[in-house]
Amino acid sequence: MTTYKKFFRYASIPALIAIGYLGFVLVWRSLGLPDTKEIIALAENYYEQYGYYTVLVGALIEGALFVNWYLPGSVVVALGVVLSRSAGLNVFLVLFLIILGFYLTALLNYALGRFGWYHVFLRLGLEKPLEKFKIQMEDKGPRILFSTYIHPNFGALSSTAAGILRVNFFKFALMALPPIIVWNTFWAGVFYFFGNALLDHLSLLIVVAGTLIYIMLFGKLKKPKEHLNIP
């Protein structure tokens, strides 16, 4: 691929985000769906009623393979930290429950890969993403967990790939915990200080996250050196 083609491919990303955002807003409004403020108000109501249970259940859902594809951003971290103050929740306990939820789902995703239960998701569009993470895991080992857990979707895929490759369970369990702690603490800090401003643009954040995930997992920005089939 020439330098110009590479340039235009990367330069097209902002355009894709802008088009996706406008399309998202138009469709959302045409369907008469609630706006961002109404969604946040509804979420706040759940946090006030069910408190810490909402945080833990939300983290378990967002960390699970395939399910978290319908939550293309760290929604639980964002809402949990921002709304914890108005709901009277302890932000440190909220963070602990988020970390616990993501860690438990990391072990679950590992089991999905280890025991072959992930096959049910291959027909639902996860074959190519899983194969790419399997190649990376085989090439670099469990240390890629630190970079992939920057986002729950990537973390779920890498955990499942570790199970497919039968990485030692205790080694995986030990190496998965630090990145989950580090990245969730980082994002919690970001949303603690800038959360209200970021949530005002929640729809844009969702579109940006979704676009970047699509490009990284389904695009062909970098072809793997070797094609490996998922067993």
Image (cartoon, rainbow, N blue to C red):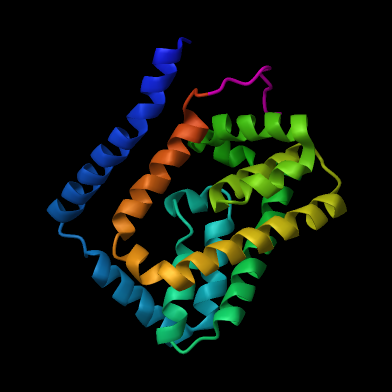
- Relative placement, left or right, of 120 versus 100 is left
With respect to residue 184, does 150 lie above or below? Answer: above
Confirm whether residue 138 shows in the render. Answer: yes
Identify the residue at horizontal 58%, vertical 20% (top origin): 223
The quadrant of the picture occupied by the C terminus is top right
- Is 217 in front, or is 110? 217
Where is residue 5, by image quadrant? top left
- Relative placement, left or right, of 180 versus 3 is right
Confirm whether residue 112 shows in the render. Answer: no
- Is 100 in front, or is 208? 208
Q: Main secondary structure of the magenta part?
A: loop
Total numbered labels: 0
Residue 224: within the magenta?
A: yes
- Relative placement, left or right, of 213 versus 95 is left
Residue 190 horizontal/vertical position (percent): 49, 65
Q: Report the magenta residues as a range.
A: 222-231
Residue 216: within the magenta?
A: no
Residue 141 horizontal/vertical position (percent): 78, 37
Residue 76 horizontal/vertical position (percent): 48, 66
